[in-house]
Amino acid sequence: MGREAARRTARIAGALTAFTLLARLRGYKLGGQTIVRCRSGHLFTTIWIPGVKLKALDLGIARIQYCPVGHHWSLVTPVRGSDLNPTERARAHANRDLPLP
């Protein structure tokens, strides 16, 4: 690996670490099962590991992913569990995405 490739890799790792820390400070639960909302308002849980994507296109705090509730591709963003009432949290946990990040 050349020096430029090593620098690029270090910048990417630093950006992912900073994004993860900032999101956690703001109250988002990242890693493992995360509650997300699609553009249509559907809530579901998905595995959200920063930097790891097998089924989605990553766009920073958002990603383009298939919504299992509305059966469409959409922009999804994580939702703080504290922003949801117990009924919404239960509905989100009942609608799970594929067990892949």
Image (spheres, rainbow, N blue to C red):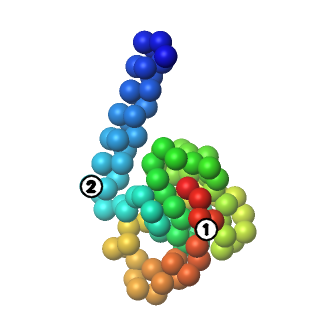
Where is residue 18? Give x, y as percent: 33, 41
Mark 2 surroundings: few (<14), some (14-19) or many (≥20) residues within 10 A: few
Q: Nearer the viewer, residue 5 or 81?
A: 5
User: First in sequence: mark 2 or mark 1?
Assistant: 2
Q: Which mark is residue 25?
A: 2
**Residue on which disc 1 sits:** 97
Q: Is residue 36 above or below residue 86?
A: above
Callout 2: SS: helix
Looking at the rendered image, the quarter that the C terminus falls into is bottom right
Between disc 2 and disc 1, the foreground one is: 1
Cα gap from disc 2 to disc 1, whole angstroms: 25 Å
Q: Quadrant of residue 74?
A: bottom right
Q: Is residue 76 above or below residue 91?
A: above
Q: Nearer the viewer, residue 36 or 2?
A: 2
Identify the residue at the far left of this view.
25
Residue at 49% over, 57% down: 48
Residue at 66% over, 74% down: 69
The type of residue carrying mark 1 is: Asp
Residue at 40% over, 19% down: 7
Identify the residue at the far bottom of this view.
87
Q: Is residue 69 left or right of residue 93?
A: right
Q: Is residue 85 visible?
A: yes
Count of marks overlaid on the render: 2
Q: Is residue 88 visible?
A: no
Q: Is residue 11 left or right of residue 95?
A: left
